[in-house]
C-alpha cells in the first residue's frame, strides 16, 4: 500500500491516473471561485440591490477629499453596498443554527466607544472585569426568543464621559437655546434592555458595568433632571403595565406602535396640552413588523404587534400625500400641516432625533404646523448644519436614546457642536 501511494505521486506512470481521478474537482473549484468573485457583480446587473441589514442606513460613498479617512470609509461603503450580502448573512445564520444550534456571533469593534460615537474625553472608566477592548456582541440573544442590541451594553461599559460631564453639556446646550429666546425640550428613549430587562440573558459580557452605569443614570434623572427634561420611561412603563404586554418588540431594538403613541402624546402634551383636543389613538388590531435585530443576525423575523393609529380631525399635510413624515436624515426636512379641526402647534419647531423618532414617523408630525426633522448625529460631521437649523426655529426638541446619552450624550454635545450652536443662536436671537 505504501508503494502504491509513493508511485502515484512520484512516477510518471502513476501520475496520469491520479490526475484523471482529481480532474472533475477543478471545474467545480473554478466555478465556485468565479461565483465568489463575480457573483455580486452579476447579481447587480440582474437588478439585485444592497439592503440595509444593520441598525443604521447604508453608508454614503466617501469623497477622496477626506484624506486618510477615505480608506476606512470606502471599505465600509463597499461592504454595505455589496449585492447579495444580506443573502450571504442569512445563509451563514441558518447554517450556524443548523450545525451549532445558535446564531453566529458578530462582534463590535474591540476597544473604544461603539461605532458612530465620538471619543470625547476619557473621564469615565469601565467599572467591572470586562476588559476595555472586549469584543461585545452586536446582538444579545435573550430568553424566549428576545434579542437585544449589543451597544445597549457596550456603550455604557465603554463610556467616554462621566455622567456629571454629560449633564453639564446638556445644560450648556439648554442655556444656549434659552438665552436666544427659544424653548428647549430634551427627552431620552429608554433602551430595550431597560424596559424589558426580564428577558435578558442570565449572564453576559459587561453585565455589571452596564447595570451600574444605567442605574446611576436613571437615579440622577429622577433626583435632579436637567431643565427642559421630558420623562418617557414612566409613561412607557405605565402603558406596558396597563396592557400586560411589553411595549418594545421581541426581535427589534425599538418600541412598537403603542410606544410611538406614548412618545407622541407625551411630547405634544409638554408643548401644549390643548394639542390633544380632537386627537384619537385608535386600536387597529393585530399586525406585524420586521425586526431589525433578527435581520442583523441574518434570520429575518416579523414581530406580532397590536396596531395603533393616530387620527387628528381636520389636519391635512401641505405639499405631500401623507401625514406620515420621512425618516430623519443628514439634511433638514421641513414639513408643514394645516387644519380646520384639531389644533396644531404653531411655533416653528426643530426635532433632533434618532431611530426611535424614526420608529414614530407615522404619528409624530401631525401636531405641528411647521416642523423640521434632522438626525442628531449629523452634528458629528456638520455642526453648522445643526446650528443653522436651530437658528431658524422657535422650539428645539432633542430626542436621544439612552445608550448614547449614557456613553457621552451624542455628537450634539461635542465641543465643536456646542460652540457652533452657541455662536449661531447668539447672533440670531428670537
Image (cartoon, rainbow, N blue to C red):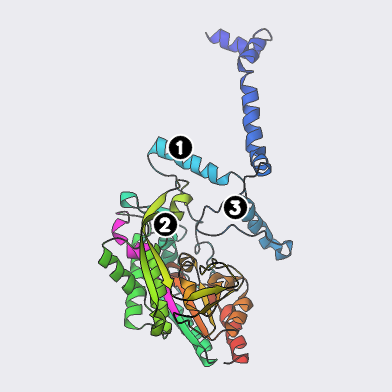
Disc assigned to residue 254: none
Q: If the image is split into quadrants, where does the C terminus sit?
A: bottom right
Q: CA distance from mark 1 to mark 3?
A: 22 Å
Of pointers 3 and 2, the one earlier in the residue sequence: 3
> Can you identify the residue that label 3 sits on?
80
Q: Are marks 1 and 3 in contact (CB under 8 Å)?
A: no
Q: Mark yes or no: residue 137 visible.
A: no
> Can you identify the residue that label 1 sits on?
95
- Identified at 38% across, 67% down, the residue is 259
Q: Nearer the viewer, residue 355 or 36?
A: 355
Picture layout, residue 22 above or below residue 144: above
Picture layout, residue 367 above or below residue 427: above
Q: Mark yes or no: residue 31 visible.
A: yes
Quadrant of the image occupied by residue 129: bottom left
Q: Are marks 3 and 2 in contact (CB under 8 Å)?
A: no
Q: Nearer the viewer, residue 417 or 261?
A: 261
Q: CA distance from mark 2 to mark 1?
A: 22 Å
What x and y, as percent, mark residue 96?
A: 44, 39
Q: Residue extending furthest right?
A: 65
Q: Circle 1 — which element?
A: helix
2 or 1: mark nearer the eye: 2
Q: Is residue 287 magenta?
A: no
Crowd tier of the residue under label 3, counting other residues whose Cα lies within 10 Å: few below 14, some 14–19, many 20 or above: many
Q: How many marks?
A: 3
Quadrant of the image occupied by residue 186: bottom left
- Identified at 37% across, 62% down, the residue is 192
Q: Circle 3 — which element?
A: helix
- Identified at 70% across, 65% down, the residue is 66
Crowd tier of the residue under label 1, counting other residues whose Cα lies within 10 Å: few below 14, some 14–19, many 20 or above: some
Of pointers 2 and 1, the one earlier in the residue sequence: 1
> Can you identify the residue that label 2 sits on?
252
Amino acid at each position: 500500500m505504501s508503494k502504491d501511494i509513493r508511485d502515484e505521486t512520484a512516477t510518471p506512470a502513476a501520475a496520469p491516473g491520479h490526475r484523471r481521478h482529481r480532474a472533475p474537482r477543478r471545474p467545480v473549484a473554478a466555478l465556485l471561485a468565479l461565483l465568489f468573485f463575480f457573483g455580486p457583480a452579476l447579481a447587480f446587473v440582474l437588478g439585485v440591490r444592497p439592503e440595509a441589514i444593520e441598525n443604521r442606513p447604508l453608508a454614503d460613498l466617501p469623497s477622496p477629499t477626506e484624506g486618510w479617512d477615505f480608506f476606512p470609509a470606502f471599505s465600509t461603503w463597499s461592504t454595505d453596498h455589496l449585492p447579495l450580502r444580506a443573502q450571504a448573512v442569512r445563509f451563514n445564520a441558518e447554517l450556524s443554527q443548523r450545525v451549532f444550534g445558535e446564531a453566529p456571533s458578530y462582534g463590535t469593534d474591540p476597544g473604544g466607544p461603539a461605532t458612530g460615537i465620538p471619543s470625547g474625553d476619557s473621564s469615565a472608566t469601565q467599572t467591572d472585569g470586562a476588559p476595555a477592548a472586549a469584543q461585545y456582541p452586536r446582538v444579545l440573544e435573550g430568553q424566549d426568543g428576545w434579542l437585544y442590541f449589543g451597544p445597549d451594553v457596550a456603550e455604557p461599559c465603554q463610556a467616554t464621559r462621566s455622567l456629571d460631564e454629560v449633564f453639564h453639556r446638556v445644560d450648556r446646550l439648554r442655556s444656549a437655546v434659552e438665552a436666544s429666546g427659544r424653548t428647549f425640550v430634551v427627552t431620552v428613549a429608554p433602551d430595550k434592555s431597560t424596559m424589558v430587562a426580564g428577558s435578558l440573558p442570565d449572564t453576559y459580557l459587561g453585565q455589571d458595568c452596564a447595570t451600574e452605569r444605567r442605574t446611576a443614570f436613571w437615579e440622577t434623572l429622577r433626583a435632579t433632571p436637567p431643565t427642559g427634561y421630558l420623562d418617557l420611561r414612566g409613561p412607557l412603563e405605565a402603558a406596558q403595565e396597563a396592557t400586560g404586554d411589553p411595549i418594545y418588540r421581541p426581535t427589534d431594538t425599538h418600541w412598537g406602535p403603542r410606544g410611538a403613541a406614548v412618545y407622541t402624546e407625551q411630547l405634544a402634551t409638554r408643548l401644549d396640552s390643548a394639542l390633544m383636543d380632537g386627537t384619537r389613538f385608535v386600536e387597529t388590531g393585530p399586525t406585524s413588523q420586521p425586526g431589525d435585530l433578527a435581520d442583523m443576525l441574518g434570520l429575518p423575523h416579523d414581530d406580532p404587534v397590536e396596531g395603533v393609529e393616530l387620527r387628528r380631525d381636520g389636519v391635512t399635510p401641505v405639499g405631500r400625500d401623507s401625514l406620515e413624515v420621512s425618516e430623519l436624515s443628514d439634511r433638514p426636512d421641513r414639513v408643514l400641516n394645516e387644519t380646520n379641526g384639531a389644533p396644531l402647534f404653531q411655533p416653528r419647531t426643530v426635532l433632533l432625533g434618532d431611530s426611535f423618532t424614526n420608529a414614530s414617523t407615522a404619528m409624530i408630525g401631525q401636531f405641528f404646523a411647521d416642523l423640521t426633522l434632522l438626525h442628531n448625529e449629523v452634528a458629528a460631521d456638520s455642526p453648522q448644519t445643526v446650528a443653522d437649523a436651530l437658528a431658524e426655529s422657535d422650539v428645539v426638541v432633542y430626542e436621544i436614546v439612552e445608550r448614547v446619552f449614557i456613553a457621552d450624550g451624542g455628537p450634539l454635545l461635542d465641543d465643536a457642536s456646542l460652540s457652533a450652536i452657541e455662536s449661531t443662536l447668539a447672533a440670531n436671537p428670537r
